Amino acid sequence: MSVRKKKLINQRETILRDMLQGLASAYPEVVRLTDDGLIVRAQPKAAGKVGLVIGNGSGHEPAMIGLVGEGLFDVNIPGEIFTAPGPDRIVAGIKAAERGAGVLLCVSHHAGDLMNAEMALELCQLEGLDNVEMVVLYDDISSAPKGSESERRGTAGLFFVWKMLGAYAETGASLAECKRMAERIRDNTRTLAVALTSCASPITGAAMFEMPDDEMEIGMGVHGEVGLGRHKLLSADATIDLMLPRLLEDLPINAGDEVLVLLNNSGSMTLMELYILHRRVAERLAQAGVRRYKSWIGPYATTQEMAGFALSLCRVDAELKRLWDAPCNGAFLKGV
Amino acid sequence: MTDSMNGADFAALIQALNAAMAAAKAELNALDSALGDGDHGEALAAAFAEADEKARALDKPTPTSVLQVTAQALLNRMGGASGALYGTLFLRMSSAFKDRDDVTCSDWSAALDAGLAGVQARGKASPGDKTMVDALAPAVDAFKAGADLAAGFAAARAAAAAGAAQTERMVAKFGRAKFAGERAIGHVDAGARSMALVFETLDEYWKGREHGET
């Protein structure tokens, strides 16, 4: 299937700058673009609360620039397209998020994100910034087997961490408590994704991978990384029937458990398709006796115009449900 | 002439690397698109362009200061896993040269050892894992067998090229290529290839220097 290679940009060298300036120009009441290229909250969090920071490659919008704001992140360090920012920029982000109670650096598990975060923490120590913790987050069950969870990569399901951890930090929880909460949400989250088409790199203009018209990839990462393997194209119901049992078994999620559902659009899926998919998700969860607290459907972590979606489940209890329902105000996530 | 390199040599070497990476941009992008996101050449070219600019701006370049500004460009301009690993390599070599004005064959041995150790500590990869280490580790070993800089660089270049070529038969253990499993076989690792290009450029530079071309 041919990939849409037409993109409305100016020059590839200025994609990042132009996008950040565009975001800041649209939502000045929510975010501000700093001179050193950080996206920060327009109104900083109250002093004495833990700052939340994440660095990531760009190209996944609205992740993560659209998730900075009250009840969400304090600072985002956007890197070049699909490229984690370097250590000096991460240190700048950490400093920008400090409100006197320490900073939690969130890392979506990918080799580059982790290496640069580790180097940034070493630099923080050298500078005497010792109230900084790092939490490594992952959710994609296709990227490493059960029992090797910490080797898994971070994908769309981390949305649950961003939302609920953001709300938790607003309550005035300590740095250690925030880190434990991030780990708790992570450990209750599982994701599996499929892709129907490839996408074009905005830098090179080339397709990121090849995908025949009659196939789908099961277990696609957020940068077009391959997963479990190719499968003949299935119907919407058959696709969910393949994915959902794997997610339920992996955690496991049992009858009587309660979950949040995310159907994340990886780029160019239609809402029509996503609603058709959700119909089957709701049906199958009900059959399994799993209660569905709330569902979110939309593009939260994209891979350019790739057609595909991620199905994420997060097992929740009363405390997590309260955090889920707490207010938030990012450029791309309001209310809840 | 003495068998040593000074700060001007290092600045000229970074200039040569800038030209080499610009010329290899498309080749490295193509290799990277098989298992990565297809921008390895783009990112390296941008980083070495910045490194060249910063090295030229140095008042009195030393091996240490030139490699330090190069490391900063790789870490912060390039970013990602490759930027962290290349940056670590140049940073460790920079420290190992200890602000000496001229560095000899034995200084190079120690610096390459320190650089390789840094890359392996940061990335956790060993030879055989289909990473830049597959070019770097044999190059470091080969260099040490050379009697002088010229012999060492020539041997390192050949070993790095051979090591990079061997990655074609490997399954990847790190980075996004690891998710491809067996599907990674048949593709040369882009990081190993660019590392081989670094040693090729180093050897070419030194050959030109010895023949009085620079």
Image: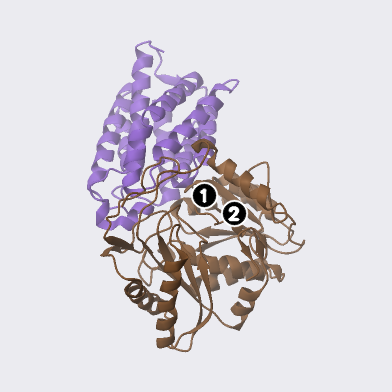
Q: Chain of mark 2?
A: A
Q: Residue furthest front?
A: A272
For label 2, the SS is helix
Colour displayed for chain B in the image of the structure: purple
Q: Position of residue A113 (x, y in %)?
A: 49, 53
* Quadrant housing residue A150: bottom left
Q: Residue at x 38, y 43 (%)?
A: B38
Contact between marks 2 and 1 (CB within 8 A): the answer is: yes
Give, as a three-letter code, the residue at label 2.
Ile
Q: Distance from label 2 to label 1 (Cα)? A: 9 Å
Q: Name the kind of residue labelled 1 in the image.
A: Ser
Front residue (pair B81, A26)? A26
Tell me if I can see residue A288 in this picture.
Answer: no
Answer with the quarter of the image where residue A49 lies: bottom right
Residue marked by disc 2:
A65
Question: What residue is drawn where x is 34% and y is 52%?
Answer: B177
Chain letter, colour brown in render: A
Position of B117 relative to A258 (above/below): above
